[in-house]
Image (spheres, grey):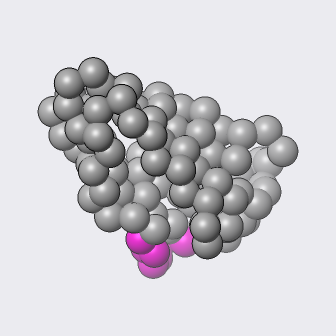
Amino acid sequence: MAGIYKKFTGAASNQLLVTKGNSNPGFYKKILIANENTSNAVNVTIDLHDGTNTYTIIKEVEIPVKSSLVLEDNVEFSSKDFSLRITISGTSPEITVIVK
């Protein structure tokens, strides 16, 4: 399965990375989040949402300047059952997210 690659600039709440029930359902096991801002940290929340309930994977984790966070332990989920969402905040956040 091909990965999902997205860029976000500016604060954003509950942005969809993977949509529940999309036309190409699959299992995802790894999330990479890279802070591309050269002078500010970014805070990131990642959650799974089934349409009713929200299950937080990480909450307001600070990613330092020019650093990355890789989530691959106990992250596996099916897009048949869940949407994967991200919320970012900070001063001029700029990130790249790869989901595989």
Q: Which residues are magenta?
A: 50-56
Residue 17 in the image: x percent, y percent?
A: 54, 46
* In the depicted structure, whether residue 36 falls above or below residue 85: above
Q: Residue at x 77, y 48 (%)?
A: 23
Splitting the image into 4 quarters, where does residue 66 fall? top left
Front position in the image: 62 or 76: 62
Q: Position of residue 13 (x, y in %)?
A: 31, 49
Q: Along the horizontal axis of the image, is 27 left or right of 56? A: right
Does 26 appear above or below 23? below
Using the rendered image of the protein, determine whether residue 70 is visible from the camera's viewpoint: yes
Return the residue nearer the eye: 100 or 12: 100
Does residue 28 appear left or right of residue 58 in this picture? right
Which residue in the rendered view is the most extreme toward the top? 38
Residue, x 20% and y 31% (percent of image)?
Answer: 40
Quick check: can you spot residue 11? no
Q: Quadrant of residue 9?
A: top left
Q: Where is residue 52 shown, x and y percent of the image?
A: 46, 76
Residue plotted at (55% across, 44% down)? 32
